[in-house]
Every structure is written in structure tokens, then in C-alpha cells.
Image (cartoon, helix red, strand yellow):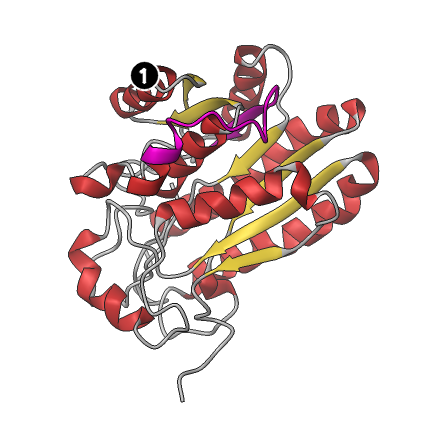
């Protein structure tokens, strides 16, 4: 699960990343469950990731789902993960019907260290003993002011947004390095770049993810593992359709002029995970329609 729209405290938290009811997945609602362009590409026969394996955390809806579908369409065998088994297995079945290869492995990334390591071991086993691509997509976003943030939400946010990527990279990157190759992509947020008057700790967790990306690139890059991040802008997902008007207002003055879609983010992940990005290490690719790089006149 990843967060796309970051509403002010007066706006309900986007279920795409809110810790309830599922801190590792996003709810499926409406026609955006399968983005049109991603669904179309999933029926293709791409080969940019042929022979590789990929794990995408929080991939039963939204950006995670779009990423799992696109990587599978490009030849990767993917693990779809999350807490909602029915959603995960539906996505796996649809990927397989389109000619791809996929498995579902349940995961609660707010769990303890040993649970996270057990998940890493399980996906490695399911994928035949190797994980070539790790996409740290899961994330939670309590939409609240600093003084109103409950301790339990703070703990969950730190666990899912920072601890889980750290433990999974520690568990999976060494084997990638031993094989001499691999790619790790973490999903960040436009909020890591700007100061906002709400969701301060969420912004801080995503800034931490960007710094981890740079540090991991320095740590694992010399051993053949490329580490990068993708930062979504205001993205319309199944969980935040009720906030479409706010999203439209946020993006109206950007160079793109429209909201970001989950498959836009998935394409950024595909690029960074593939051979075309062989010389790309430690960057955060902002897929936000120019929202953070420009200012309306």
C-alpha cells in the first residue's frame, strides 16, 4: 500500500495508506482497481524483466497492484503481498490469465522483526530461491496534526514506512549482492520534499526512505545492487476517489495539469528496476506532474 493524495487533517485519511483496516494493503473500490493502461499492458508480451523475480509489498490495490501487473506483463515472476487474501489471489489469477506468473504471499508489515524476516524467507522460497527485484511499496498515512497523532498510529507508521523496508532490504539485498545483481525500489512521496502544515511525521518517514535509498545505493551499489526510489505526486487511487475534487485542485496548476495515476508510478518503477536504468543509483524519481519542481505563475 502506498499513499498518493495527502489530505489536510480536515479531510478523511486516504484508505490507500491509512493503517485501518489493513496496514499492508489498500481497499478495492470503483473502476480504478485496475488502471486502464496497466490492464491493457498486462495483456502484452513484454520481456524487459524476463527471467527475473519481483516482490511488491502492499500490492493488492492502487500503486502496488499496478506495479505488480506491469512487472508481470514485462516478464517478471511476481509476488503479490498484503493482508487481504481474496484481493491478492484475484490479482494473481488475473495476471496468470494474461499470461504472466504470480503468487500471493500474505504479509502484515506492521508486525515484528521476526515476522518480517519470515516473510522475506517465504517469498524467496516461493520464487525458487532468489529475489531479483524488491519494491518497498507498503506505507501508512495517518492524516492528522502533530498533537492529534495517536501513539498507536505513530508506531504503525514507523513500523511500516521505515522499519519494514529496512528489515526487508537487510534480509534480501545480501543475496542479491552475492549473485552480483538486483534492484530495489522504494516508494516515497512528494511530501518528503516540501514542508506542509499537516502529517509532519509521515513526511519525515518518507524523507527517511529517501535517505535510506541514497545510503543503500552507496552500500550495495558496488556489489551490483541498484537502489532507487519513486516519489508519487497527487495520485488518484481506489482509496481516495472521494477526494477527486481536491486532487484536481492540487494538480490543476502543475505542468501536467492532471492527477497522477497508479500506472504512471508503476512505469517509473519498471524503468528503475530494468536494465535501461543500469547507471541510475540512489535517486528519487519524482513522478508528480512537476508539482514539486515548479510553481504556478
- In the image, 291: left or right of 293? left
Residue 272 vs 141, above or below: the answer is: above
Q: Looking at the image, which residue is at 71% across and 41% down?
A: 226
Q: Residue furthest right?
A: 222
- In the image, 94: left or right of 101? left
Circle 1 crowding by C-alpha within 10 Å: few under 14, some 14–19, many from 20: some
Name the residue carrying label 1: 93
Give the percent coordinates (x, y) of residue 25: 34, 35
Q: Nearer the viewer, residue 47 or 22?
A: 47
Q: Nearer the viewer, residue 166 or 276?
A: 276
Q: Looking at the image, which residue is at 32% across and 16% down?
A: 93
Quadrant of res 86: top left
The total of numbered circles placed on residues is 1
Q: Is residue 226 magenta?
A: no
Give the percent coordinates (x, y) of residue 177: 77, 29
Q: Looking at the image, which residue is at 53% across and 43% down?
A: 269
Residue 280 vs 67, above or below: the answer is: below
Quadrant location of the N terminus? top left
Residue 120 vs 252, above or below: the answer is: above
Q: Is residue 53 magenta?
A: yes
Quadrant location of the C terminus? bottom left
Q: Residue furthest front?
A: 45
- In the image, 151: left or right of 8? right
- In the image, 264: left or right of 31? right
SS assignment for the magenta stretch, majority? loop
Give the percent coordinates (x, y) of residue 224: 78, 35
Q: Looking at the image, which residue is at 26% across and 64% down?
A: 247
Give the percent coordinates (x, y) of residue 193: 52, 68
Residue range of the region highlighted in magenta in the rendering: 39-57
Quadrant of res 277: top right
Amino acid at each position: 500500500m502506498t499513499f498518493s493524495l495527502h489530505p489536510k487533517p480536515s479531510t478523511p485519511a486516504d484508505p490507500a495508506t491509512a493503517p485501518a483496516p489493513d496496514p499492508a494493503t489498500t481497499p478495492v473500490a470503483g473502476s480504478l482497481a485496475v488502471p486502464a493502461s496497466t490492464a491493457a499492458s498486462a495483456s502484452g508480451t513484454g520481456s524487459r524483466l524476463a527471467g527475473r523475480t519481483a516482490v511488491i509489498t502492499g500490492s493488492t490495490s492502487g500503486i502496488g497492484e499496478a506495479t505488480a501487473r506491469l512487472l508481470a506483463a514485462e516478464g517478471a515472476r511476481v509476488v503479490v503481498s498484503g493482508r487481504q487474501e481474496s484481493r491478492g489471489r484475484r490479482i494473481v489469477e488475473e495476471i496468470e490469465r494474461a499470461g504472466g506468473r504470480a503468487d500471493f504471499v500474505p504479509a502484515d508489515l506492521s508486525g515484528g522483526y521476526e515476522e518480517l524476516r519470515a516473510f522475506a524467507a517465504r517469498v524467496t522460497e516461493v520464487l525458487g530461491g532468489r529475489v531479483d527485484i524488491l519494491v518497498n511499496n507498503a506505507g501508512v498515512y495517518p492524516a492528522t496534526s502533530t498533537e492529534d497523532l495517536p501513539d498507536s498510529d505513530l508506531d504503525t507508521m514507523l513500523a511500516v514506512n521505515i522499519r519494514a523496508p529496512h528489515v526487508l532490504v537487510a534480509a534480501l539485498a545480501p543475496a542479491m549482492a552475492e549473485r552480483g545483481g538486483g534492484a530495489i525500489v522504494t516508494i516515497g512521496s512528494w511530501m518528503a520534499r516540501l514542508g506542509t502544515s499537516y502529517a509532519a511525521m509521515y513526511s519525515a518517514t518518507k524523507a527517511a526512505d529517501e535517505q535510506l535509498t541514497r545510503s543503500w545505493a552507496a552500500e550495495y551499489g558496488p556489489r551490483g545492487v541498484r537502489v532507487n526510489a519513486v516519489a508519487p505526486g497527487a495520485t488518484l487511487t481506489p482509496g481516495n476517489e472521494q477526494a477527486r475534487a481536491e486532487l484536481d485542485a492540487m494538480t490543476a496548476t502543475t505542468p501536467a495539469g492532471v492527477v497522477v495515476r497508479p500506472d504512471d508510478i508503476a512505469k517509473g518503477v519498471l524503468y528503475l528496476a530494468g536494465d535501461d536504468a543500469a547507471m541510475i543509483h540512489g535517486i528519487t524519481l519524482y513522478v508528480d506532474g512537476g508539482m514539486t519542481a515548479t510553481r504556478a505563475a
